[in-house]
């Protein structure tokens, strides 16, 4: 149980285009989802926290207009990287937690490469 | 702000060797502490946790004790196996872990037969 999936697992796009990454909780209802970014040999950096049905809360320094997060249902959150540039190339990881628990369940991550 | 510092890797051990991965933290308040493990090609999984001082988290032969006086949460295992090869992340969180987590950089462990 407590499986989180991400799609796609990797994506290559051209500079200036937008890319959408999906995060799904497969067997539980995720009241809160988190989006992280990981650079090579670096720790996971929290980008934003999203609660189902409300606007995401972004960490300091994260551009909310560039990284659009939608958490429209209890099993799906999406991260859209708008007008992507090469410096947005990274590993994006989501996690999910349900009400009443204190454990985050992580997706396998999405590798984004912007050419 | 809150931060986590963990031992730089990579760490390479022979099977049945003793493992220690150091982790120290800086935080206001009384955070919960976690160790997550990431096996090749998979997402992070919670390995163990401790929510207050002197608590010991344990799972799959791994242990870590929440030491408030030294602000540490070192991960140990008495006898590692090849299957323990993975990246280990130390993390802290507030309010029992349901809030956001702050991660260390991760330590890659390779266990050779």
Image (cartoon, helix red, strand yellow):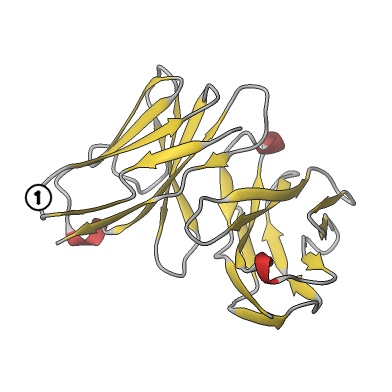
- The extreme right residue here reads B54
Chain of the residue where label 1 is placed in the rendered structure: A
**How many circles with numbers are drawn on the protein?**
1
Q: Which residue is at 69% across, 60% downward? A: B25
Residue B112 at x, y = what percent? Answer: 66, 81
Asked whether, in this view, residue A13 is left or right of residue A8, the answer is left
Circle 1 residue: A16
Asked whether, in this view, residue A102 is left or right of residue B1, the answer is right
Q: Is any atom of residue B14 visible in this view? A: yes
Q: Is any atom of residue B1 visible in this view? A: no
Q: Place residue B5 in its image quadrant.
A: bottom right
Q: Which residue is at 52% across, 25% downward? A: A30
- The extreme front residue here reads B113
Q: Which residue is at 71% across, 36% downward? A: B96
**Between B107 and B38, the one nearer to me in the picture:** B38
Quarter containing the C terminus of chain B = bottom right
Residue A69 at x, y = what percent? Answer: 32, 32
Q: Compared with residue B71, is residue B34 higher up or lower down, i.e. above or below?
A: above
**Between B55 and B1, the one nearer to me in the picture:** B55
Asked whether, in this view, residue A69 is left or right of residue B37, the answer is left
Q: Which residue is at 49% across, 37% downward? A: A4
Residue B37 at x, y = what percent? Answer: 62, 57
Residue B55 at x, y = what percent? Answer: 88, 48
Q: Compared with residue B14, is residue A63 higher up or lower down, i.e. above or below?
A: above
Element class at badge 1: loop
**Between B82 and A3, the one nearer to me in the picture:** B82
Local packing at callout 1 (Cα closer than 10 Å; few below 14, some 14-19, many 20+) is some
């Amino acid at each position: 149980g407590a499986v989180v999936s991400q799609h796609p697992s990797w994506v290559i796009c051209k500079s200036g285009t937008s890319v959408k990454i999906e995060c799904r909780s497969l067997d539980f209802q995720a009241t809160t989802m988190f989006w992280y970014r990981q650079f090579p040999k670096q720790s996971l950096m929290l980008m934003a926290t999203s609660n189902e049905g409300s606007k995401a809360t972004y960490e300091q320094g994260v551009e909310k207009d560039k990284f659009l997060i939608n958490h429209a249902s209890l099993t799906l959150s999406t991260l859209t990287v708008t007008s992507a540039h090469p410096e947005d190339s990274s590993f994006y990881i989501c996690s999910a937690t349900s009400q009443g628990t204190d454990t985050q369940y992580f997706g396998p991550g999405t590798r984004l490469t912007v050419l | 702000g809150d931060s986590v510092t963990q031992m730089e890797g990579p760490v390479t051990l022979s099977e049945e060797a003793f493992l220690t991965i150091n982790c120290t933290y800086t935080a206001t308040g009384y955070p919960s502490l976690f160790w997550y493990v990431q096996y090749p090609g998979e997402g992070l999984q919670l390995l163990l946790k401790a929510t207050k001082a002197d608590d010991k988290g344990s799972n799959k032969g791994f242990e870590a004790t929440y030491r408030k006086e030294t602000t540490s949460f070192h991960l140990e295992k008495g006898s590692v196996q090849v299957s323990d090869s993975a990246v280990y992340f130390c993390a802290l969180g507030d309010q029992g872990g349901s809030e956001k987590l702050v991660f260390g950089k991760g330590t890659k462990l390779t266990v050779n037969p």
